[in-house]
Image (tube, grey):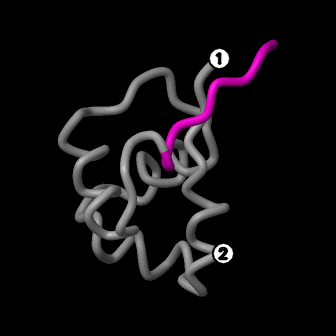
Amino acid sequence: MMRLKVLDLLEKQGKTKYWLYKQMNMSYQNFSRMVNNETKSIRYENLEILCQLLNCTPNDLLESKED
């Protein structure tokens, strides 16, 4: 199972979920599902934006976890 480490990266960088939400230009419901790992898919466009905003690579952003 893959998971996004968005909250971990935000904490390390001293940024808030609200700051990221305002930058992402998406509905709060979809944003919340994405950062809380409650979604089944994520668009490449959103991955790219996350990487740009958090100054990271997809390898930094994604983590593989065993069920």
Q: CA distance from mark 1 to mark 2?
A: 23 Å
Residue at x 63%, y 61% (from the top left corner): 7
Sequence-wise, which precedes: disc 1 or disc 2?
Answer: 1
Q: Is residue 43 above or below residue 16?
A: above
According to the image, label 1 marks what residue?
1
Q: Secondary structure at mark 1?
A: loop
Provide residue 61's location: percent of width, then percent of height.
49, 47
- Mark 2 burial class by Cα count in 10 Å: few <14, some 14-19, many 20+: few
Tell me, yes or no, whether the two marked residues, 1 and 2, touch with CB atoms within 8 Å: no
Outermost bottom residue: 14
Provide residue 32's location: percent of width, then percent of height.
53, 53
Q: Is residue 1 above or below residue 55?
A: above
Residue at x 34%, y 57% (from the top left corner): 50
Q: Secondary structure at mark 2?
A: helix
- Mark 1 burial class by Cα count in 10 Å: few <14, some 14-19, many 20+: few
In the rendered structure, which amino acid carries the disc numbered 1? Answer: Met
Whether residue 51 is in magenta: the answer is: no
**Magenta-tinted stretch:** 60-67
The quarter of the image holding the C terminus is top right
Residue at x 41%, y 24% (from the top left corner): 41
Provide residue 57's location: percent of width, then percent of height.
37, 50
According to the image, label 2 marks what residue?
11
The quarter of the image holding the N terminus is top right
Q: In the picture, residue 52 is in which quadrant?
A: bottom left
Q: Quick check: 66 left or right of 19? A: right
